[in-house]
Image (tube, rainbow, N blue to C red):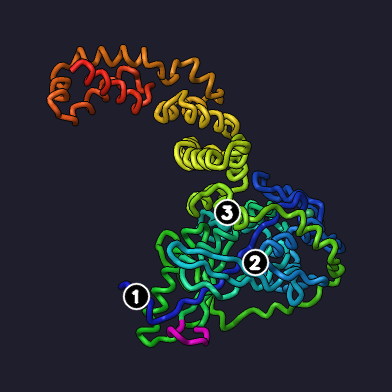
Amino acid sequence: MTTIPATRYETVIGLEVHVQLLTERKMFCDCSAAYADAPPNTHVCPVCMALPGVLPVMNRRAVEMVVMAGIALNCEIPSFSKFDRKNYPYPDLLKGYQISQYDLPLTKNGWIEVEVEGQPTRRVGITRCHLEEDTARLTHRADQSGDGYSLVDMNRSGVPLMEVVGEPDLRSPDEARAYLVKLQRIMRYIGVSKANMEEGNFRCDANVSLRPAGSTEFGSKVEVKNMNSFRAVHSALAFEVQRQSAELDARRRIPQETRGWVEGDGRTVSQRSKEQAHDYRYFPEPDLPPVTLDAARIDQIRAELPELPDVKLHRFERDYALSHYEANLLTETPARADYYEQAVAGAANKPHQERLRYAKQAANWMLGDFARLLHAGNIDIAETRITPANLYAMIALVEDGTISGRIAKSVFEEMFSSGKAPADVIRESGLEQISGSDEIGAIVDRVIAANPKPVEDYRAGKQEAIKYLVGQAMRETRGRANPASLTEILRTKLEANA
Ligand SMILES: [Zn+2]
């Protein structure tokens, strides 16, 4: 397929994200929801296996988590909400219906801010967040004769699932990815989900259509499924934009359908036509009472929410004088942001300018050497052996001239692998910066004696020659001298004995 610029058309994308909630128990029974490493069909009971004669009991924690998410996504929280049955026959749905929410969801009419690099921040609408139950897992196999069969694992059946339905406000695959990243970050901040696409506890379906630029009517909508990473979502949407614009250019009608992303082929394929859409025959769930939330309880949940990512990001920019880029990376996870703040807290009583210098240094370390070592060792910051106090102590040793910035790098690597305090690393390896002018003076004398040619050049007026001599002297000190003071001593001696 040739690449056709999509500028004649406007892209319209809306995302539906299923977020598995981190409750201890399943949605309507007492089974443990932590089934990830369990053998198949071990987290089951008569309720989540849908045996006859059982009744569901609502997990209040799951309800609270959806309310938390709704507040974090700027939604309204109605005081009255209810569950409904969504009827459809499928082998992963043991009851033959799913307990979900239809017309009265727990939260509605929210928004989040989405930012694509180089473009202004845009507000994207959230239609609703509602609560439902996850389905069982099917694994499709083939026997020796090639006949297909499926295995059912009911461990996932009945795990609380929140669906976040977004408005069709996204205008590009880049925006769709930024929206997902932001949504994931918020879910992790408020601790309601692991929100990991690869693990399947954060699952995204996309609706995408094109319309002539300037039009206000929607084109026919294609639903895309089977995307298991942010990258897959971006690639699948980019593919659809190209495919649909080529169809429209050729004056072909775009059928309303569901398409699946085939990662290996890098394309979407038609799965089923939406024209025979399911009639889910929703009706109110008779086995569960409606959910009523009084204003005091909602206020309490609001008050207990942690600081949200955008608020933290702007506070970091403001209080620590960091760039947007730095603040964004440092607030990517609450653990990283907390670590940074604990490290910087050591400078809390210092004068303003000095405090900002520490804040900048701590940011440089965390986004530089520290990030590199964590990444290389595949280590989470929560598990690092360097304490925030020791990172602060090391920056303080650079600030007061005990070690040079270059030596600090090797001190830091040793701290990273051993967990030792910087002062101990320095004492044990003799890495203190040489500041006594006697010691540096002796080294400078040796370098002058050993290099008559550059010395002569310098004294003849070739200023450049001093660089070589500084390099030699720094090598003799094994980098432990301050280059500026060493240069000064060298210059003084060269000129005094000229
Ligand atoms: Zn159960």
- Confirm whether the magenta stretch covers residue 460: no
x, y (%) of residue 439? Answer: 36, 13
Between residue 434 and residue 316, name the one nearer to us. Answer: 434
Tell whether label 2 touches label 3 (CB within 8 Å): no
For mark 1, give the secondary structure. Answer: loop
Amino acid type for the residue under numbered disc 1: Pro
Whether residue 469 is situated above or below residue 67 in the rendered picture? above
Name the residue: 70% across, 72% down. Answer: 108
The region drawn magenta spans: 211-219
Mark number displayed over residue 313: 3
Q: Amino acid at mark 3?
A: Leu
Instruction: Name which of mark 1 and mark 2 comes first in the sequence.
Output: 1
Q: Which secondary structure, mark 3?
A: helix
Does the residue tagged 2 have its C-beta within 8 Å of any atom of ligand 1? no
Q: Which mark is residue 276?
A: none
- Residues at marks 3 and 1, CA–CA distance in whole angstroms: 35 Å
* Crowding near the residue tagged with mark 2, few <14, some 14–19, many ≥20 C-alpha atoms within 10 Å: many
Residue 5's disc is 1
Which of the 4 quarters of the picture holds residue 99? bottom right
Gap between marks 3 and 2 measured at Cα: 23 Å
Q: Residue at x 35, y 23 (%)?
A: 479
**Mark 2 sits on what residue?**
164
